[in-house]
Image (cartoon, rainbow, N blue to C red):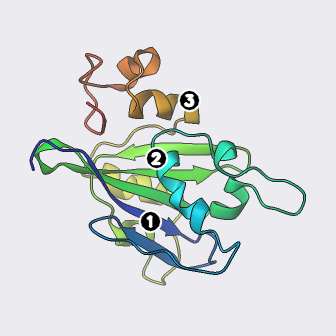
Amino acid sequence: MPDIYQLKKIILIDSFWTGKTVLLNLDGHINLSGTNGAGKTTFLRLIQLFWGERPSNIVSSTGSKKGFLEYYLPRNSSYLIYEYQRPKQQTCHVMIQSDGRAAKYKFIDAPFNKEFYIDENNLPRDSSSVDRLYRATVETSNLMSVDDYCSVIQCHKRIAAKKGCARCKADSPWHPAQ
């Protein structure tokens, strides 16, 4: 299995459940259950976000219904994280946050480490602290817009070559679709 790409985990920190961490391990069988309107279908759509779908296309706000960002990334301390595996067992992750208007994406060339996101008091760290902890040992990208992220994750030549992608003749360590 050294030459496969695989989405391994989806992690939500301080998301729709205030102060809680939700880890969805995608190795094997997954069973989502809940009442009508509990968010099962929306949760399944999180996979579309990984591949570059705009959050507003997954869930848009209408009337009293919260939009994707208001529901999944309501606070500065809210994170949506995708851990994925590249060929030769290299594991990376994407951290997504909201600035209140749009989602911001950051690639991190390392597996998800809960201690880097949650402090000793069991509170979420701010994104600059998370970045500082990872940057000490691995490469991280700058924050990206959804368009730039989509270009890298789907290997569109417009921006992927600038951000780094082997398939597009550049050198990204995190590109999952090479």
Q: Name the residue: 64% across, 48% down.
A: 58
Which callout, 2 or 1, points to the residue nearer the camera?
A: 2
Q: Compared with residue 158, is residue 121 higher up or lower down, i.e. above or below? A: below
Spot occupied by residue 176 in the image (x, y as percentages of width and height): 30, 39
Residue 147 can be seen in this image: yes
The kind of residue on which mark 2 rests is: Phe
Q: Secondary structure at mark 2?
A: helix
Which is nearer the N-term, disc 2 or disc 3? 2
Which is nearer the N-term, disc 2 or disc 1? 1
Residue 75 can be seen in this image: no
Residue 114 horizontal side relative to residue 66, left or right? left
Q: Residue furthest front?
A: 36
The kind of residue on which mark 1 rests is: Ile
Location of the C terminus by quadrant is top left
Q: Which mark is residue 147?
A: 3
Q: Name the residue: 46% across, 37% down.
A: 142
The kind of residue on which mark 3 rests is: Asp
Q: Compared with residue 178, is residue 27 higher up or lower down, i.e. above or below? A: below
Residue 78 horizontal side relative to residue 30, left or right? right
Residue 171 horizontal side relative to residue 81, left or right? left
State which quadrant residue 38 falls in: bottom right
Residue on which disc 1 sits: 11
Q: Residues within 10 Å of mark 1 (few under 14, many from 20)?
A: some
Residue on which disc 2 sits: 50
Residue 23 or residue 116, whichever sits in front: 23
Which callout, 2 or 3, points to the residue nearer the camera?
A: 2
Q: Name the residue: 85% across, 54% down.
A: 62
Spot occupied by residue 163 in the image (x, y as percentages of width and height): 38, 25
Residue 97 or residue 40, whichever sits in front: 40
